[in-house]
Image (tube, rainbow, N blue to C red):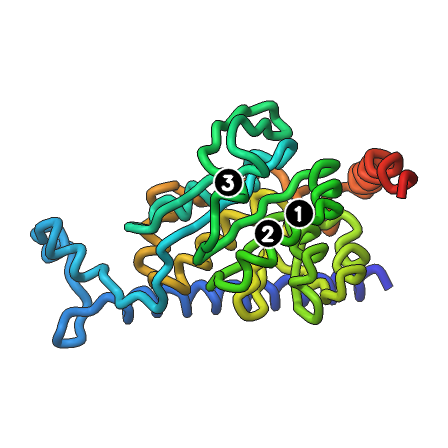
Amino acid sequence: MVTLFLLVACKHEGAEKDVEGQAQETEQEAKVERNLKPDGTPYSDQELDAMSHDESMMVLYEVPRDTVRTIGVLLYDGFFTMDAMGPLSVLNSMYPTEKKLIGRHKGTITSSDKVKIEVDFGINDIEQLDMLVIPGGFIETYQATKDEELLAWIRKMDKNTKYTVSVCTGAWILGAAGLLEGKKATTHWYRAEENMAQYGATFVKERYTNDGKYWTSAGVSAGIDMSLALVDQILGRNYAEFIALNLEYDPQPPFESGHPDKADRVVSVMMEKMFDEGLKPFKDEE
């Protein structure tokens, strides 16, 4: 029986590696086919090295699929720093798009890591955005789901946005605003299915996903993946790869524990209990 189990496990692992290998092969083929000379052949290293900056940029240039002129990132006390700054580090490279950091009120916003950020805009200063990005946090994010003035502003922005985006538990805020009703969405793994269901959304266990103009990512670092996918959709793969390479975004963690499916069960259970205890006093008040 043990031998049979090992054989099945090895076969399954081998099949996974085959699929992964095929995906990498397809990706490599797509890269070759994407940037060809007018005669349909690939550029040699010598030809690429001999190009001027302007010539190389013309090779890289792809006709944008969309125009995004303004991107607003909503900040509030207690937001997770990387939830906002990870996507911003990607989206900042979208030119000539204007990026705005927007607070509940303009002034100093303090993240969960005690990073203080000065924002020039409060929600009452902004009337329209092409893209709205809502980062997550913990206690303060839960409290934001009860902030009717903030939720009303988000709904107002959403009427004209081309992309309404959340990172991590920012999906709780989108859900509380009523924007994920009947949509597929992802969020931080903590009680994710339950949290999305209460807002009428269907949880999808993916690193990021979109349903129409609504883009959502899983926890914290997944916001970088989602932002690269957004750039890929809006400005094309060359530009998205350009940004990823500039950031040297090539994650290779020293161990795999970034999701409950991979983390030690002791770690994931204790973290869930910690989250439960953190929210309990606020839920008890309702």
Quadrant of residue 11 in the image? bottom right
Element assignment for label 1: helix
Where's the C terminus, which quadrant? Answer: top right
Q: Residues within 10 Å of mark 1 (few under 14, many from 20)?
A: few
Whole-percent x, y for residue 214 in the image? 57, 63
The residue labelled by disc 2 is 153
Residue at 68 percent across and 42 percent down: it is: 257
Q: Which residue is mark 1?
A: 149
Q: Which residue is drawn at the image coordinates 28% and 50% (left, top)? A: 96
Which quadrant holds the N terminus?
Answer: bottom right
Lower position in the chain sequence, tag 1 or tag 3:
3
Q: Categorize mark 3 by other alpha carbons within 10 Å: few (<14), some (14-19), many (20+).
A: many
Q: Foreground mark, 3 or 2?
A: 2
Q: Secondary structure at mark 2?
A: helix
Displayed quadrant of residue 248: top left
Query: Residue drawn at (70%, 57%), measured in percent from left and top?
Result: 175
Confirm whether residue 254 shows in the render: no
* 147 or 130, nearer to the observer: 147
